[in-house]
Image (cartoon, coloured by chain):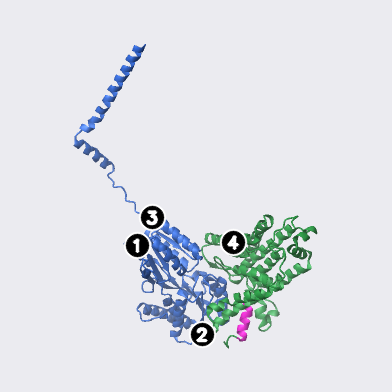
Chain colours: A blue, B green
Amino acid sequence: MKRVLFQMGLVLMLAFLVISGCAPAATAVPEAAPATEKTVIVEVEKVITATPAPVEEKPFRIALVLPSTTKDASFSQSMYESLMKLQGEMGADKLEIAYSESLFKLPDAAAAIRDYASQGYNLILAHGSQYGSSLREIAPDFPTTAFAWGTTVNTFQSEGINNIFAYTANAEQGAYVVGYISAMLSKTKKVGFCGPVEAGDGRSYFIGMKQGVHDADLGVTVTPIWTGSYSDVTAMATCAQTHIQDGADILSGSSQSVTGAIAAAKENHIYWFGQQYDMIPLAPEEVIASQIYDFNLTLKDMIAAINAGVYGGKVYTLTFKNGGLELRYNKDIKLPAEVMEKSDALIEQIKAGEIQIPLN
Amino acid sequence: MGDLFTLPVLLGIIYYGIRFATPYLFAAIGETFAQRSGVLNLGVEGMMLMGAYTGFYVAATSGNLWAGLLAAAIVGGLMGLLMAVISVTFQATQGISGIGLHILGLGLSTLLFTTTMTGVATIIGFPSIRIPLLGDIPYIGDILFNHNVLVYTAFLLVPISNWILYKTTFGLQVRAVGQSPQAADTLGVSVKKIRYITVTLGGVLAGIAGASLSIALINVFQENLTNGMGFIAVALVYFGAWRPYGVLLGSLLFSFVNAFQQWVQLKGVAIPADVAVMMPYILTIVVLAFSARRSTKPAALTKKFERGEA
């Protein structure tokens, strides 16, 4: 029995040796194969992948942080729609846009800005002059992310921060024309202004309007009422109604909350000049014209700068000359020809630098 | 300065003071009922916002201002009911649950605005109604008897609510529940039922207060339209010592000073605009400080009630 087992084991061992001995022989063939054969195999692989692998082009990613909604008919909506227009031009596959709205509270806005930066967005637009301190704190932590804020002229470059852009609008330019035209149109010789706080856009807009009224030299006065808030719609409504009660027949104002004042102008059939966004649809029979902010060129230049490796340090200004500002008239309100001619002439003079509006 | 103290300015202040006291009156009288029964509702602001949105949206889409007003009252009432469920049935801390409702109203009204409306829009609100004969009285006629229906209603609500609180059995029960819920309970008054009714009523009036802004006074809706008016209304209840006529006085005073500060700016009085804007708030704080001692605060205000508890 033992012998039988020994013989069987021997046979199995021999069989194993034969099989295992054959294995190296099989791999030996390619080893012995000439180098040309190898090349052929590689070439075949090349043929299979003859079409070059598509280079994955990453979209440019912009995040927008807004103090009010994208439908505020004012400052926030003007930036949002500029971005949408740009996305329409570039294509949704080339430009990705994300936004967070209604972030009046600074801690919430700061959290959103940091979150977008952490997610790798190329450009983060903090669309409000209240967001400066947040950017100053966050931007140094993300040196290859570009940030932008406005309206302001401060990029914080003097403090060694090189990845913040700033943008502003020469609101006083359109306001000057508005003031001049208002003086020409006013029958009561009283023009009213409703502003949020005496700073930023509101302040420069009022200065421009005041100078325009003054330069018209027609004995018209313009008076401001400041509501102390960017969001108090009721205060804006009472502001407009107070002006109307005082006899003003042309009104204008600046901030997201002017919708309340426009509604009051509409109720009393008093003319209004809009600011920052096209406000004609809000009161088609009362809004004569709106100064509109167009950030399209500013955004394009920022993208080009970032693609070239420049992440900040530049200030952009919207003006009549560079197309960032437009005074859009309501076609349904017929104004005297001399008023329209004067408006066109004033805009050309501002573009040519013939009219200066000092803000200090 | 001389231009400030003239008849046209005085008439202007009174006219807009009366007009813009309206939302404060609706909201603060509703809150008076709630607080008189022992429930502090800090969610008035959120309820006003939901009322303002609903009123505007329904009125704009249906073309019927009354439908908008009714919808605002219903939504406000539902939010009041929610507040009652949280604070009366579940006995949550009233202050915290009210703040929760405020945040809910703010967020929900903004969300609904951005998703259901194409943007900020205006509406033709309730028109002014000149009351025959009275409206023709020189000067006074225009400023007192030429307002829209919600302004008249808000002012009529003061004597009505005063009568309810002091001359009816229901008013007695409300005051009893707010003063001593245990005693009221032993006399067979359902504390929970009374509190449910007052807090829901407060919600209805807060909803109407919001709608008074969006479809009668400003005629526009945008996010955070009320901008803190609901909290001012709560302060006015303390200011008015939990009495409708006191609330009326506070609402008018706040509204008049608010109108006055705008005239101060308009007439170029040498006061910084920032200081002028603070005037109504400073006045409110001063009056609250002086009236704190004589106030008759409901003894059971903010206190939970459970049967059998001492």
Amino acid under disc 2: Lys
Q: Is the residue at mark 2 from the same chain as the one at mark 4?
A: no
Q: N-terminal of the two: label 1 or label 3?
A: 3
Host chain of mark 1:
A
Q: List the residue tagged with mark 2.
A: A189
Q: Residue at x 47, y 87 (%)?
A: A218
- The part of the chain drawn in magenta is B5-16
Q: Please name which of the two marks, 2 or 3, marks the residue nearer to the observer.
A: 3
How far apart are labels 2 and 3 at the CA level? 54 Å
Res B105 label: 4
Res A155 label: none
Q: Are marks 2 and 3 in contact (CB under 8 Å)?
A: no
Q: Judge whether B115 appears above or below A53 on screen.
A: below
Q: List the residue tagged with mark 3.
A: A93
Q: Quadrant of the N terminus of chain B?
A: bottom right
Q: Is residue B11 magenta?
A: yes
Q: Judge whether B187 appears above or below B153 on screen.
A: above
Amino acid under disc 4: Gly
How far apart are labels 2 and 4 at the CA level? 44 Å
Host chain of mark 3:
A
